[in-house]
Amino acid sequence: MSAAGEARERAIRWLAVRERSAQELRRRLAEAGFDADVAAEAVASLIDERLQSDERFTEIFVRSRRARGQGPFRIRVELEQQHGIDGETVRRHLHGEEADWYEAAWEAARKKFRGPARDLRDRAKRTRFLTGRGFERDQIESALERLEQEEHENQ
């Protein structure tokens, strides 16, 4: 089997386990010792055959990370910088029909914290937690206010 054929077969095995970006496949093939041109050719053939799709990868990635309680900023950075996904594809999936990041921020805050913040230090701790998860300022403020409102309603 040719080097291109071996690279293609190896990439197919990786894709059978989970979706991967084209950049990730090229990088992994290079790390496995394949020439960069061979790796690029193998990945291009998989894209042509629709066995690899950055669009599909991005959709699954966003859904998975959101389920883990991560916010749009963190997901965007990871997709663009580590997986080589273009900005337009990332925006389309981050701000699609199912994307309610205010709800996601509230869910992450609710899982981590119970009740309203006790003081400014506690509120700052909660803000840092949600910022670290990749949520934006207005999403964080909304989530923390909603936690406080629910506590008042339950009393």
Image (tube, grey):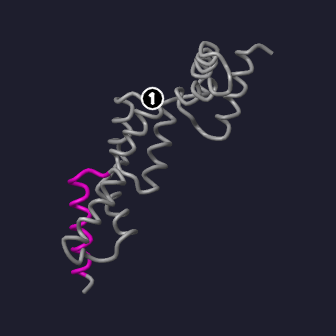
Above or below residue 90? Residue 131 is below
Q: Whole-percent x and y of residue 31?
A: 63, 27
Q: Which residue is the extreme one toward the bottom? A: 155
Q: What stretch is highlighted in magenta?
A: 135-153
SS for tag 1?
Answer: loop
Q: Residue at x 44, y 44 (%)?
A: 62
Quadrant housing the N terminus: top right
Q: Which residue is drawn at 54% across and 26% down?
A: 22
Quadrant housing the C terminus: bottom left
Horizontal arrangement in the rendering, residue 47 relative to residue 88 (left or right): right
Horizontal arrangement in the rendering, residue 100 relative to residue 55 (left or right): left
| Residue 143 image-quadrant placement | bottom left
Above or below residue 51? Residue 68 is below
Residue 119 painted magenta: no
Q: Whole-percent x and y of residue 152?
A: 21, 80
Magenta segment, prevailing SS (helix, strand or loop): helix
- Camera-nearest residue between 38 and 102: 38
Q: Whole-percent x and y of residue 114?
A: 34, 76
Residue 142 painted magenta: yes
Q: How crowded is mark 1: few (under 14 residues within 10 Å), some or many (20 or more)?
A: some
Q: Whole-percent x and y of residue 133?
A: 36, 54
Horizontal arrangement in the rendering, residue 69 relative to residue 31 (left or right): left
Q: Name the residue under label 1.
A: 84
Above or below residue 35? Residue 130 is below
Three-letter amino acid code at the position of disc 1: Gly
